[in-house]
Image (cartoon, coloured by chain):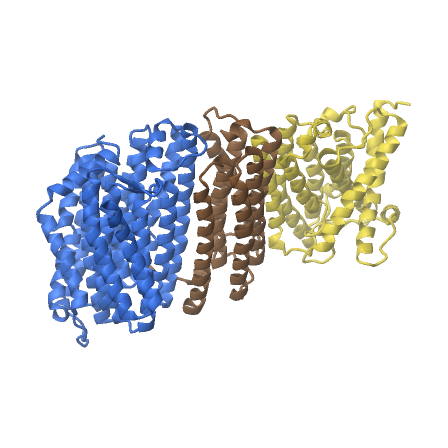
Amino acid sequence: MFLAHVTPLQASIFSSLAIVSLLLTFVMLGSHWLRNYVYAFAAQSWLIAALSAAVAYFGGYRELYAIAVLTALFRGLVLPLLLMRIVDRLHVKREIHAILQPSSSLVIGALVVMFAFVISNHMNQQALPAGRVVVLALTIMLSMKFLGFLMLAVRDEAISQILGLLVLENGIFLGSQILVPGMPLLIEIVILFDLLIVVACFGMLVRFLVVHAGTTSSRQLTRLVG
Amino acid sequence: MILSDALLQIGQVLCVLLLAPLLQGFILKVEERVQRSRGPSFFQPYRDLWKLFHKQSVVPESASWIYFIAPIVAFTAMLIVPILIPVLTDRPLPQSDMGDMLGGGMILTLGSFAIILAGLDSGNVYGGIGSSRAVMLAILAEPTLILVLVGISLLAKAMLPFVVNHLLLGSLSTYWSPAHLFLILAFLALLLVETDRLPIHSSTHLEIYMIDEARILEYSGPLLALLKWASMMKQFILYTIFCNVFLLPWGMSQLGTALGQFGSVVALLLKFLVVALAIVVVETVQSRLRFYRYQEPLAAGFLFAVLAIVSSQLL
Amino acid sequence: MTQPLLLILFLAPLGAIALSLGLRHARVAEYATVIAALADLVVSVPLLARTLRGSVIEGHNYVQLDTLGAWVIVCVSIVYALSSIYAVGYMRLLNEEHRLPLFYGLFSGFAFTMLAACVMNNAGVFWIAIELTTLISTFLVGFEQEAESTEAAWKYIVVVSGGISLALLGTVLFYWGGSFVLGPSYAMTWAALRQSAPHVYPPLLLVSFLLVLVGYGTKAGLAPMHTWLPDAHSESPAPVSAMLSGALLNTSMLGIARFLGVVNGTSVSRFAHSAVVGFGIFSFALASLFIVRQTGIKRLMAYSSVEHIGVQALGLGFGGILGIAGALYHMLNHSLNKSLMFFGAGNAMRAYGTKEISGIRHVLKTFPVSGILWLLGAVGIAGAPPFALFLSEFTILRAGINGRYRWAAIVFVFFLIVIFVGFLAHFRAMYFDDAPEQEIPRLTGTVWRTLPMWLAFLPLLALGLWWPQGLWDVFTKITLDVMGGVR
């Protein structure tokens, strides 16, 4: 397995890229401004693309170069551009944190990272070679999942919820680059394009929300109950 | 000529004592210069202290013995801490095993605690406000401080700052490891809060923001001088810890010669120059946060400290 | 012989999409959709028969038609056919002729993605197909462009996308676990996963399975992840509701069934089955409580869907020939019955102009023929004989009583009684209660909107009286091949 032969230098490169991506998720969690969310997401996607390229270089997986380029292009450029268009059209600048203040979200996020670490450690009890990078990858993947769900749950604005979903996908992608770099190319490419279609659909839906429901804040979408 | 250990230790304490106002003066002057005004001279804090020592002391009627004891306790605590941390030499000097990092942190907090009590002592409204706000900040900042100390202990597998210093000097990979970088960021957040830089900036005289000035509002004369000197020394000490333990562990005297000591002092001042410039940039770029948002930079600091601990386990 | 049939199965909806969106004429779109759906229905039965002899692998191992997939294709095609016939009559009531081609294009696209999901051999591509069904059906849910529909569509896509991202994580973890056995790069077919599962580190396998269960369970409508379901099913147009309830939930249960088959026979199998039973019984209980106090007619049907998906999960969790056969038979019967109910509800909504049960009274006066069908369908969906749902629920009960899950079977019976009383209380109110003074609605039934109800009702009655031996063969084969044999 690839992770069995990782030198310390490679391990530290992978780890730093992954950890800074996680940090950017916290930026998204703790910020008040919608534009900052999109910038942080773009930076995160670029870092993940760099991670793909690093895995391709050190592991000898030629196809991952293509994935890296596609990730940088689509997740790093096209998606943030689409999201910025949606944000601009919405005339909403700030996220009003009604349920959880940013600082509390940061603290909860820190606790979540610890929890994810405990889970990954437990899952990795098997004597896996190069265990630490694996545990790191699992931890960051699970933490980004939790943080994405946290963003989905406590945020009002439609854009924040879209970004929460995209963070979920980013987390899975990051984990899969480190854990399963040999996953068939077709699946990875299709998932990339799938994301694009998802965001396009979200864009249309947000427009419908504004036109028909009059608001994009989910605190005010309370017509359907019971 | 190699100085004796006792002389070196006294020299450390004197260095902190005498150079603390210089650091304060430097920061104030550079801040003003960055904003294109002239600013006070570098040595203004010395002149202020001199002036205060020659003034009469006015004591409120409702003051008790705490009023007199608190500045002395704070000042003394700030004199004790330089004994425990690497200031000029990077090998432990006599009495530096009196307390490890947690002990040093405790003594620093003891000083702040004394001043908080002093604020409450005379029954003044402003003192009460200042003390309660200071305690709130302390509550928010203490967990981060403890976690930072825990993190650095986990990295170095020891609780002594000297061991950490040697580790960072010796191993480049530890210096650049994510755990260490996160700890630097966490301590930076703490530094900003504890030394009253923006976004907290509590050393103003505006009621709505003042924290430190409120606590010492009742003091005058020599006691006030002691309090001000203590807070300047606290700033110096925190900068020392930041530089010599975390950020720039180089440039400290190893053998203990007189020339080495002098060079170490110069190196210390240079390091502080770098950090102070960075702090001034941070201050100038930001504006003050509203009071209920003080938790945000501290939560970020807490986050960094937790991430540092997790990364130290993972890497 | 199978290849042409498969081609027809997939090309028919594609052709309907092309004609609808290309020619932009409402009548053409309607008829093209109906013809495509009927073609699919006709083709699906021989395909099912063909798979009894063995699975069909096409397309570089990416397409696999096995018995389980063929069975779900049959269910989906039936709903597709019935709904498309009903849609012709229903959508004309909306008076939006210019948007109808878009509707039919999306409708056939929705059916196409569901059919594609059934034959996907690769777990990753299966996920992609499910994701596509979500995307297309969102626009169908929000088709009426009211505030409520848009809100329902938004909730649908956010909750379900979040849910199936969990399923993607589970799939990646499955792949990772398998990579220790099969090497770093292998095709993630169901057979490969089944082969590698016994050798994977058990906690990892368990976490992967639970993630997949929760993920696809969100899409299937298992509680507590069902929160999107009442909104989406009640706010969409009635034919779309029938498709969502009758076809989409089944396709998601297909995912759960396949993964359950993957872990069957490993050390985590027991926990996995218990988890499925747990979700099933929780959905059932929760749905029954919501049914009792429901006020909207289509939300009532939606909670009934949650209930029946819970029953299917119970059947899969109980396992064994009886459990799985019951669950699969339930898929078919639920598709028929739920379509019938949604068609009736759509008729009632359009006639009385309200979604509230309290606003619908004296149904028999408005709909003499289809009203009787609707009432009998309600009796059927509450689980009474002689309708088909009774047979499948009884089979599942038999499977549960004899095994480890006796407690679940007892809870099941209790809440069945609760649902029977609650559900039929609403219908009694609608049919036999006195109404406040209101004018008699003007809408009468048309052939387009009544014929599908007949077409749904008659097989329901027939299957309730007679369980064909051929179906037993199908279910036995599925149990042995896909679900890993009898426990």
- Residue B157 drawn above or below residue B105: above
State the residue lying farthest toward the right. B1
Image coordinates of residue B185 in percent, x first then y, are 66, 42
In the image shown, does B218 or C267 lie closer to the viewer?
A: C267
For the residue pair B12 and C280, the one nearer the viewer reads as C280
Query: Is residue C301 among the parts visible in the rendering?
Result: yes
Is residue C484 rendered to the left or right of residue B308? Answer: left
Q: Which chain is blue?
A: C
Residue C380: % across, % down: 14, 53
Placement of the N terminus of chain C among the 4 image quadrants: top left
Front residue of C403 and B238: C403
Is residue A18 shown left or right of residue C67? right
Residue at figure coordinates x 86%, y 30% from the top left: B261
How many discs appear? 0
Can you give x and y, in whole percent of width and height, for residue C437 in the image? 18, 75
Query: Position of B291 compared to C300: left or right?
Result: right
Res C358 visible? no
Outermost residue, bottom side: C439
What hue represents chain B?
A: yellow
* Residue B141 location, quadrant: top right
* Residue B222, horizontal then vertical, whole percent: 83, 45
Q: Residue at x 24, y 65 (%)?
A: C31
Q: Quadrant of residue B315?
A: top right
The C terminus of chain C: image quadrant? top left
The chain shown in brown is which? Answer: A
